[in-house]
Image (cartoon, grey):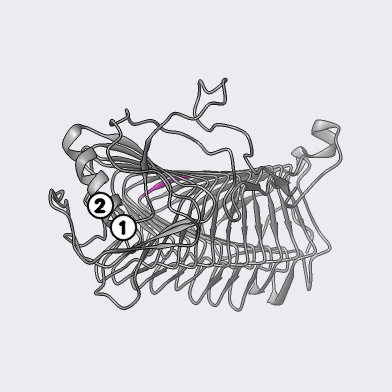
Amino acid sequence: MGLAGVTGLALGTVGVAVGPAVGALGSPLAAADDRGGDRGTPDAGKHDEARYDDRATHGEKAKGGAKGKHDEGKGKRDDKGGGSGKKPRGIPVPCDADALIAQITLANARGGAVLDLAEDCTYLLTFDIDGAGLPAIVTPITLNGGKHTTIERAAAVEEFRIFTVDVGGDLTLNKLTVTGGQTDEDGGGILVNAGGALTTNHSAITRNIAGGSGGGIANSGTTRVKYSTVDRNTAAAAGGGIYNTGLLEIVKSHIDNNTSGDGGGGIFSTNGTVTIKGGSVSGNQASNGAGMFLSSSIGTVTGTRIAGNTSSGSGGGIRAGVGSQLTMRKAELADNTASILGGGLFVSGAEEGESFATIEYSLIKNNVTSASGGGIFAAGQTVLRHTKVIGNQANQGGGIYNEGTTSLFTTKVVENIAITDGGGIFNAGGTVNLNTATGTIVIKNRPNNCVDVPGCAG
């Protein structure tokens, strides 16, 4: 999938200036530097954190749901060592797409650069350079944007993505919008090949389309999405927002309103690692694992709101499938919908490769499915600690439907609804360990609390 860099200039590209062009070509090259912005971009920095602390254990009032902390990131540098607050000087790039192509070409040839793009400018790309609108990134390159700085593919030209990051490439985007990319392959907006790296700070990857996987970003290398948004992207296959087969870290960012034709409307990871801290995964749509789909992957979610995702199959919020490991802490899994199994969470069993899920200090609330497991469909190994399962709905197992082994510690399963049976927990031949001595309770569920669960009053 690796793509070669381009040494020549592309003709016919146009820069559209909303404000006056700034800077000029010809300044000495600066060393590449990861520079976090001091001004937020759209939706950047929202930090929705759900907490559930048990009163008896911690002596604090129980809390559930998003706290709504809002980190704009104003006046702060994202990288370390920025105490002076002074910006490193980069090469100014006027509001002209040819100028941007020229500077990236030079940076690749000279071992990297920091480029300062113009504010109030759309760099409108019109020419396909080996599948992308810009030369493939093969060295450390930082692109610094600002207010209303956008890199966009022109609508009337042939299809191509915006960026390809190849082996040795390390691309950092600061305060930029990447939009309009379209390809029949993977990575509608950005493709990160194995051996490449991408970091986005206070940026937006939006309205890109992939005929394969990864509408916004397809990552086979190392990608860090920080204080950014990945939204309204589309993939015909998997990963409407992000498709991952490498290392993916998401920090205080929003993976929202993306769509895929297969799994993982927001995020799809196969044979990879995903770490999410804060922010949201919401409003995404897919056939399975609408918010996030893990396949033979490790996923860790901390302080994140996963909400309002819709699946036409299983796992409205998250699907932990095919031998995956999922850990959720202080997270909120709410208002997700699946047509078949696991409105909130689906944990796969031995038939497709047993998965493991550990959920701690979290809230699983108001998820819905028309079949089994409104809150959780558990066919693998599932452990809940200090967690609330409340207000979920299903035909069977309003709160939890279990076919594997589910263990609850200091957990509350309350006010869930089943249309036919097992309002709180429906055990279908598996093992449910309530551990009531730790404070686990299953009460106020309709039409009953449990089916075939030892120690649970019907």
Judge left or right: residue 416 versus residue 277. Answer: right
Instruction: Name the residue tied to disc 1.
Output: 97
- Picture coordinates of residue 108 (x, y %)? 20, 40
- Picture coordinates of residue 458 (x, y %)? 78, 64
Q: What element does badge 2 sit on?
A: helix
Task: State the residue in front, 299 or 253.
Answer: 253
Residues under numbered marks 2 and 1 in contact, where contact means CB atoms less than 8 Å apart: yes
Give, as a single range, the part of the protein colored magenta: 297-301
Which dot marks residue 82? none
- Picture coordinates of residue 49 (x, y %)? 68, 46
Instruction: Name the residue tied to disc 2.
Output: 101
Mark 1 neighbour density, 10 Å: few (under 14) some (14–19) many (20 or more): many
Disc 2 residue type? Ile
Task: State the residue in front, 441 or 167.
Answer: 167
312 drawn magenta: no
Q: Residue at 25% across / 71% down in the picture?
A: 184
C-alpha span from label 2 to label 1: 6 Å
Q: Is residue 69 visible?
A: yes
